[in-house]
Image (tube, rainbow, N blue to C red):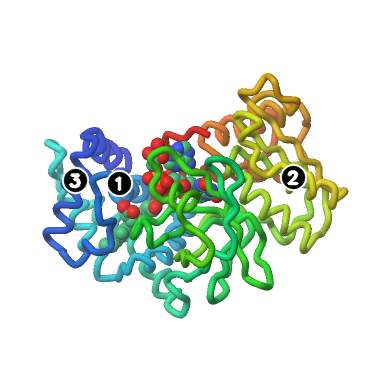
Amino acid sequence: MDIPAMRANFGKAAATGDEAPLYFYSHLFLSHPETRAMFPVSMAHQRDRLFTALGDVVARVDDLDSLVPILQQLGRDHRKFGTLAAHYPAVGASLLATLEHFDDEWTPELAKDWTEAYTLVSQVMIEAADEAAGQPAWWDAAVVAHERRTIDVAVLRVRPRTPLPYAAGQSVSLETDLRPRLWRYYSPANAPRPDGLLEFHVKARDGGPVSSALVRRVGVGDVLRLGPPMGHLALDPESDRDLLLVAGGMGLAPMKALLDQVARQGPSRRVDLFVGFRTEDHVYDAPELRRLEQEHPWLTVTVAVSHDKNSSLAQGDVGEVVMRHGPWLSREVFVAGPAPMVDDTVSRLLRDGVPRQRLHSEIFAPSRPGPSVDGEVTE
Ligand SMILES: Cc1cc2nc3c(=O)[nH]c(=O)nc-3n(C[C@H](O)[C@H](O)[C@H](O)COP(=O)(O)OP(=O)(O)OC[C@H]3O[C@@H](n4cnc5c(N)ncnc54)[C@H](O)[C@@H]3O)c2cc1C
Ligand code: HEM
């Protein structure tokens, strides 16, 4: 497979902006009208998710080892859309038709390579979906508490009707009837509990349909749908290494889940948690963080602000503040938040000598295209 040629070919379609996704969806919905009902009612205001992801994922088949676990999660996750094995060839045909349409230099080799790569990727997703057949495709979960913490942040507690298995640090996608077929990822802020309760921290984004509904319109008694767990942030059960947890904004949620797991299961170890916000007004969880620090002698919490000179909190980007408190060479490190914050923190820690295999990060991008995610993210 000539991966660079495939990437260059996909690049031509991607360079057309909205045109290629439009062509792709028109092709798919005309050739297979039965797939239309799986997608959001209005695609006009929806940032394309599937087409971009397809190019991104399929052109990474040269790194199948790291791709497989992600594809398995995606395959299980796609059951919530009603995606069946028979739909995969349909999407593949529309993908190829689109890539051919936007490339004057389309070749039979490209056609062969894309078909091979797409088939490989589909097979992994289909097999994982089949293996999950005994599990629910999604979990109905009633909202049992809704707390508005700031003008744009709410903390929701939900109780799935049947237990949703996940690991602390993972995220799940979520849909509300108020925004049908718009699924977005959120990270539970607690480790799995015997009563099955999950806590979500949600920040309403400007023009964001799901986040603003969750913060401003959803209330106690409403039922949400949750997808299966995704993501790779998780504690290694074999390790009792001390931890460094770094969060930007809502990235605090999975860090609290990891902290909760250490508190529940041990072994007890030193945990340093750094959380960055723009200004002190954005610090939506201060009393809770103080309580945790008082309760657990092994925990230190540092809250930093990047744009609030009048605050008495630590000053600077959270990555910068973390480095002032180092060295962190012996730690297992977890980082979550917006892309610039995660990239900055991870590169500082790498430069400082923290081994790459001990650095685990998750970017809270507007959508989740696959192994490496980039998006226009600001906190
Ligand atoms: C693995 C993962 C975990 C996540 N966990 C959480 C979480 O615990 N809490 C939480 O609040 N969000 C989380 N997110 C982000 C969340 O999935 C949604 O992207 C977000 O809530 C916006 O959804 P929306 O439908 O309101 O807006 P969208 O329709 O997705 O986006 C509308 C516009 O809002 C802006 N926007 C959207 N998302 C962001 C963002 N993250 N940063 C800056 N601008 C943005 C963009 O300009 C975008 O074009 C997570 C994302 C990922 C990938
Ligand atoms: C190799 C095949 C496929 C890959 C790699 C893939 C991957 C993805 C990814 C990464 C997303 C974005 C998730 C997010 O960020 O919210 C997505 C969304 C989606 N996929 Fe797939 N997918 C594949 C095949 C299919 C098929 C066959 C169907 C069914 C027709 C399908 C239906 C959907 C739908 C409905 C969405 C949500 C779209 C939206 O919200 O706009 N996918 N897919």
**Residue named by callout 1:** 46
Picture layout, residue 235 above or below residue 207:
below
Query: Mark 3 or mark 2, which is nearer to you?
Result: 2
The picture places residue 264, in percent across and down from the top left corner, at 77, 62
Query: Circle 3: is it few (<14), some (14-19), or many (20+) Cα within 10 Å?
Result: some
First along the sequence among labels 3 and 1: 3
Q: Nearer the viewer, residue 26 or 352?
A: 26
Q: In the figure, is residue 140 to the left or right of 323?
A: left
Q: Nearer the viewer, residue 8 or 322?
A: 322
> What label does residue 287 carry, if any?
2
Q: How far apart are marks 3 and 2 (CA)?
A: 47 Å
Q: Nearer the viewer, residue 264 or 214?
A: 214
Asked if disc 1 is less than 8 Å from ligand 2, the answer is: yes
- The quarter of the picture where residue 279 lies is top right
**Residue named by callout 3:** 22
Three-letter amino acid code at disc 3? Leu
